[in-house]
Image (cartoon, rainbow, N blue to C red):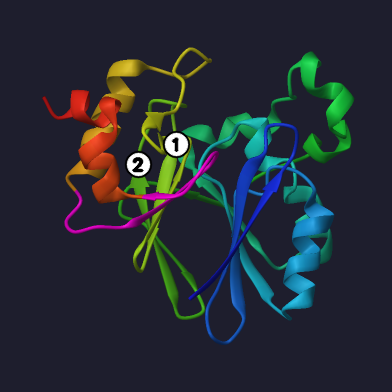
Amino acid sequence: MTIYQTRVGPIETNCYVVADPDGNAAVIDPGAEGERVNRILDEHHFQLAAILLTHGHFDHIGGVKKLLAAHPQAEVVIGEKDAPMLGNKPGAMWTPYIDLNDYTDLRATRLVREGDVIQVGSLSFAVLDTPGHTRGGVCYLCEDCLFSGDTLFRFECGRTDLDGGDYPTILRSLRKLHDLPGNYRVLPGHDELSSLEEERQGNPYMKEAVR
């Protein structure tokens, strides 16, 4: 498995391009700058099979439309409870930094829930329901990687004061991640990468979740 990470948009969202040895690829959370993500795909001759969204906030979905324009065969995958968010417009404070056309007529082609698996070539992305930052947030497990979206950051967790957020719920999601067997590389929606064992040992929100 090959992973390319780039930061996109005004909030510097982590976007991941993940490919198998044959060049079948998934893009996780293309929050903006779809043209730049397309260039990564083109430079490495990857075939985009799926766009995997961890949740529906604007800074994670803004590149979907441009990716689909270049790769119309790609699935657009999101947790079923966050699917309505694809019709939301970003707040007015962000309009100077984004193209509102990127948020017109967005829709998913596949809605997922706990236990679903998205196959991308030889790669299997297992879905974990991890609400709390939004109503329908999900994480994706693939090999030794946990793509945690805005559920789990390095020694932090996602904010819960936005619509659909709920602090007790995100603590339950953090407990679920804590209890995963073994260790995983944690590739979050923002900030730096870490490992699940680091988070078990040092993340105060995860520690609260398992008290």
Q: Residue at 52% x, 34% y: name it.
A: 82
Viewer-side residue, 125 vs 4: 4
Looking at this rendering, what residue extends furthest in the left direction?
A: 211
Task: Name the residue that disc number 2 marks.
Answer: 129
Element at badge 1? loop
SS majority, magenta: loop
Q: Is residue 100 visible?
A: yes
Task: From this view, report whether residue 165 is shown above or below residue 83.
Answer: above
- Which badge, 1 or 2, comes first in the chain's sequence? 2
Question: Magenta residues, as a range?
Answer: 180-194
The percent coordinates of residue 37 (x first, y second) are 75, 59
Element at badge 2? strand
Q: Residue at 82% x, 40% y: name it.
A: 102
Task: From this view, report whether residue 100 is shown above or below residue 127.
Answer: above
The percent coordinates of residue 53 (x first, y second) are 56, 47
Classify residue 19 as left or right of residue 104. left
Viewer-side residue, 198 vs 189: 198
* Magenta span contains residue 135: no
The percent coordinates of residue 127 (x first, y second) are 37, 53
Within-10-Å neighbours for mark 2: few <14, some 14–19, many 20+: many
Within-10-Å neighbours for mark 1: few <14, some 14–19, many 20+: many
Residues under numbered marks 1 and 2 in contact, where contact means CB atoms less than 8 Å apart: yes
| Cα distance in 3D space between marks 1 and 2 | 6 Å
Task: Name the residue that disc number 1 marks.
Answer: 137
Q: Amino acid at mark 1?
A: Gly
Q: Residue at 80% x, 15% y: name it.
A: 92
The percent coordinates of residue 184 (x first, y second) are 31, 58
Q: Residue at 11% x, 24% y: name it.
A: 211
Classify residue 99 as left or right of residue 167. right
Marking on residue 207: none
Q: Amino acid at mark 2?
A: Asp
Task: From this view, report whether residue 174 is shown above or below residue 95.
Answer: below
